[in-house]
């Protein structure tokens, strides 16, 4: 059990505590009974989102800091508080909700912010991409018996162990005994080069602790065996295996920090912030060049992303996933970075084309390095060529050694500077466009 002890030592010293403290304060401010369950949904637009029955609670907080600039959790105060009561399962208009401002500090939250968020793909965990209104419906119906076999219940509950390794409880119904299961990440590489977490496949993937102290080794093994069966069965409500549902519930009841980095580089942000163009840092296997446009500005305001091929007037299918009737953009470590897919209209495409064809003024920003400006000017005349320059340099390591005399090499995935701009007006006829 030495390996288990190592897992248990690695704890979240921040996120779990601040979420629990915030829930405690919210209950006091809204007169919610102390023993009521409030789910933590996500951090969005610089605010925390919670679920209590049919209410979404949006909160912000402040804390004093110690000499090391760490937050002093006990000094936490709620500075902003909004309560949205859901009148419909999928609210689409003002009439579908009751919006209340309880406290307003520096963070302003509006009805439009909420309506944009409610059908965003969930970022609670990597594998469940359903929009939040469907996650809310699932959590409203969740209870201790949601994930079970004939002889066992598998569930999450709040405790004082803030372990990073996924852990849940099990109830042995025959012996009226409780166990705690720890499930370390099991990762595999997909054919396209992405790494994903998969459910446990054998009993060595699950560590079990008998909390009752009355179960035999055989009985503990039986629990692990039943858990493997349950974890790998399909959950109709979530459209995926039970394992990911168990992981999602755990993260809403007792969240821990997870890696959610997005490896991208911004190429353009024009004056009115309507053309924010990015390239990715890494490509998947056999992936063709592409760029991204965020709306309206890459920050907590972003809600949707257009992903466009650079060598053809098509949307970049490799980064787009279809969830029911909705398409989403999904990328990043553990697949946590998710946005609504954005299909551009005719007016925006014309603006994009005009911009890409326009002369680049980037060289004017390089006068601090005249030698580099001279090299850059040899390759870049238009914004389109600047996009190519950044793609080659950022994504495919062209001239990282400082040797700009060697032109881009197509065999390495780099793009020649004379690549014509595709006629992006044809995006309107993309056969996969909704």
Image: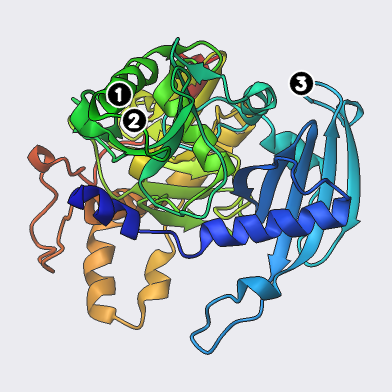
- Give the position of the C terminus as an image quadrant: top right
* Pointer 1 with pointer 2, Cβ within 8 A: yes
Q: CA distance from mark 1 to mark 2?
A: 6 Å
Badge 1 density bin: few <14, some 14–19, many ≥20, Cα 10 Å: some
Residue 219 is marked as: 1
Q: Which residue is mark 2?
A: 215
Residue beneath the point at 29% across and 41% down: 184
In the image, residue 273 lies at what x, y percent? 61, 54
In the image, residue 150 lies at what x, y percent? 45, 9
Q: Earlier in the sequence, mark 2 or mark 3?
A: 3
Badge 3 density bin: few <14, some 14–19, many ≥20, Cα 10 Å: few
For mark 3, give the secondary structure.
loop
Badge 2 density bin: few <14, some 14–19, many ≥20, Cα 10 Å: some
Is 108 situated left or right of 174 in this image?
right
For mark 1, give the secondary structure.
helix
Residue beneath the point at 10% across and 66% down: 403
Residue 89 is marked as: 3
Residue beneath the point at 63% across and 24% down: 142
Q: Is residue 332 visible?
A: no
For mark 2, give the secondary structure.
loop
Q: CA distance from mark 2 to mark 3?
A: 43 Å
């Amino acid at each position: 059990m030495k390996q288990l002890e190592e897992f248990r030592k690695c704890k979240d010293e921040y996120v779990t505590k601040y979420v629990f403290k915030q829930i405690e304060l919210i209950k006091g401010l809204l007169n919610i009974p102390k023993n009521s369950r409030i789910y933590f949904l996500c951090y969005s637009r610089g605010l925390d989102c919670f679920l209590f029955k049919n209410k979404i609670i949006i909160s912000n907080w402040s804390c004093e800091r110690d000499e090391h600039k760490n937050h002093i959790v006990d000094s936490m105060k709620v500075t902003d508080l909004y309560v949205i009561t859901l009148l419909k399962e999928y609210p689409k208009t003002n009439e579908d909700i009751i919006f209340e401002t309880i406290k307003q500090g520096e963070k302003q939250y509006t009805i439009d912010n909420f309506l944009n968020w409610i059908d965003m793909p969930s970022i609670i965990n990597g594998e469940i991409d359903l929009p939040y209104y469907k996650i809310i419906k699932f959590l409203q119906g969740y209870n201790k018996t949601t994930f079970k076999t004939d002889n066992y219940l598998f569930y999450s509950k709040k405790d004082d162990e803030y372990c990073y390794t996924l852990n849940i409880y099990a109830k042995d119904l025959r012996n009226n005994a409780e166990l705690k299961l720890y499930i370390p990440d099991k990762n595999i590489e997909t054919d396209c080069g992405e790494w994903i977490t998969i459910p446990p496949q054998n009993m060595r993937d699950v560590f079990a602790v008998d909390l009752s102290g009355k179960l035999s080794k055989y009985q503990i093994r039986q629990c692990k065996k039943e858990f493997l069966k349950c974890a790998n069965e399909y959950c109709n409500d979530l459209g995926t295996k039970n394992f990911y549902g168990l992981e999602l519930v755990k993260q809403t009841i007792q969240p821990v920090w997870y890696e959610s980095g997005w490896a991208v580089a911004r190429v353009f942000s024009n004056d009115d912030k309507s053309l924010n163009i990015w390239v990715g840092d890494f490509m998947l296997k056999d992936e063709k060049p592409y760029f991204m446009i965020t709306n309206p500005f890459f920050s907590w305001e972003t809600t949707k992303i257009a992903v466009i091929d650079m060598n053809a007037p098509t949307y970049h299918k490799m980064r787009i996933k279809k969830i029911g009737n909705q398409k989403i953009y999904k990328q990043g470590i553990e697949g946590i970075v998710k946005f609504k897919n954005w299909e551009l209209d005719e007016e925006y495409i014309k603006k994009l084309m005009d911009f890409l064809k326009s002369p680049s003024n980037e060289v004017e920003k390089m006068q601090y390095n005249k030698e580099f400006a001279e090299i850059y000017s040899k390759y870049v005349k238009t914004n389109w060529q600047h996009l190519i320059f950044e793609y080659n340099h950022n994504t495919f390591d062209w001239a990282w050694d400082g040797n700009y005399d060697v032109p881009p090499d197509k065999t390495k995935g780099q793009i020649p500077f004379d690549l014509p701009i595709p006629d992006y007006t044809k995006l309107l006829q993309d056969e996969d466009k909704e």
